[in-house]
Each structure stands twice: as structure tokens, then as C-alpha cells.
Amino acid sequence: MTNDWRADPLAWGDGPTVLEVFLEPTCPFSVKAFGKLDALLDHVGKDRLTVKLRLQSQPWHMYSGVIVRCILAASTLQSGKAAAKSVMAAVAAHREEFEFDRHCGGPNLETTPNAIIRRIEGYSGLALAAAFAIPTLDREIKWHCKYARQNGIHVSPTFMVDGLVRADMNSGDSVAEWAAKLSA
């Protein structure tokens, strides 16, 4: 791939209310929130809500940077955001295989970034290695980091509604609770 790539925005729905969800792909709380987003869109209505995923890489999740790059690489493929969502779902379904025990030990100490990429490819059914190697993909990764920092986001999951951080929303809330908070 050359510089003619495009990362598909990770956005679903086209409603006037915008929910931005900052997620780290291997964080158990982010995984919980990610698993409810489709149900939230169905509940509220895709014509009333836009959900935008923002990737919040966190250094204590040791392969976070590699996995975030895989997700954004997937967004450059022909199926764009659907491919990125497939990668996120694959990581979420096998979260423990991408994380260190207590963030510092376990079998993943012997794992390489290439092995992580191959593992994600196996679970998602997508060829990611070429897209992962796009040298300028960094600009998309940096955009997600900069955007989070500019909005004071430091942890995941964090929820932002129409540009305002909502500290009262969390991954433990039900879809109905989220919907009520969106309309409040």
C-alpha cells in the first residue's frame, strides 16, 4: 500500500445526537461497553444517534498500540469500518489472548507483535499485515491520541455526548440507562 490509503471513520448511525466512546480494545470495561453499542443504536434509532468509536491506547495494556494499529489498519481495507469492527469484536471475544496477566506477566511475554497480528488475522478472517505496514498509518493513530488528550480523556471507557464528557455513563450501565442519559 502507498499513500493513497484512507481510514474509514469508525462511526455508525446518522442521528443528531453524537456519542463518542473512547475504548481500549483489551480493557475489560471497554469490551463490555463495545458489546452494547449496536444494541444502543437499535434502541435509540440510527436516525437519532451517531456513535463514534475513538481508540484510547493505554500503556499498561502492553499490546494496546499494536492492536489499535491493527484496528485502524483494518479500517483502510475495502470493507472499512466493518473490517475495523470485526477486528475489535475478534479481540473482545478473545481478550485474554491479547493481554498480560496482571498487566505484567504470563504467556504473552513470549509473544511478538507479528504473532499478535497473525492471531488477530486468524480470529477476524482479515489479512492485516500489509495494511499494518503502511508507514503513514501513524497519522491516524496520532489523531486518535491527540483528540483524546484535547478532550481530557485519559482512561477507557470514556463517554462524550455532543462534545461533553459524561462521567455518569459507564460500561456497567444498561442500554436503557445509556439511552435515558443521552436524552437527559
Image: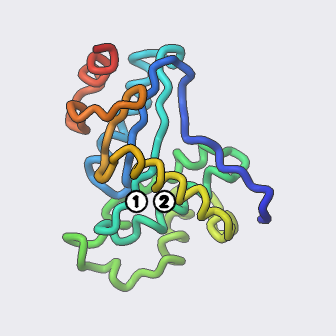
Where does the image place residue 125, in percent across and percent down from the top left?
59, 57
* Residue 83 visible (yes or no): yes
Instruction: Look at the picture and state if 161 lies above or below 34.
Output: above
Q: Which quarter of the figure has residue 131? A: bottom right
Where does the image place residue 164, in percent across and percent down from the top left?
35, 31
150 or 54, which is in the foreground? 150
Amino acid carrying mark 1 in the image:
Ser
Name the disc covering residue 57, or none: 1
122 or 154, which is in the foreground? 154
- Asked if the residue under mark 1 is in contact with the one under mark 2, i.e. CB atoms within 8 Å, the reply is yes
Where does the image place residue 96, in percent across and percent down from the top left?
31, 63
Q: Residue furthest bottom?
A: 110
C-alpha separation, residue under disc 2 versus residue under disc 1: 7 Å
Name the disc covering residue 34, or none: none
Instruction: Look at the picture and state if 177 lies above or below 132.
Output: above
* Residue 89 visible (yes or no): no
At x 54%, y 77%, the residue is 114
157 or 41, which is in the foreground? 157
SS at circle 2: helix
Instruction: Look at the picture and state if 89 lies above or below 169.
Output: below
- Counting residues from the N terminus, which is met first, the one under dot 2 or under dot 1? 1
Looking at the rendered image, the disc whose residue lies closer to the viewer, 2 or 1, is 1
Could you tell whether 73 is left or right of 22 in the image? right
Amino acid carrying mark 2 in the image:
Val
| Residue under pointer 2 | 68
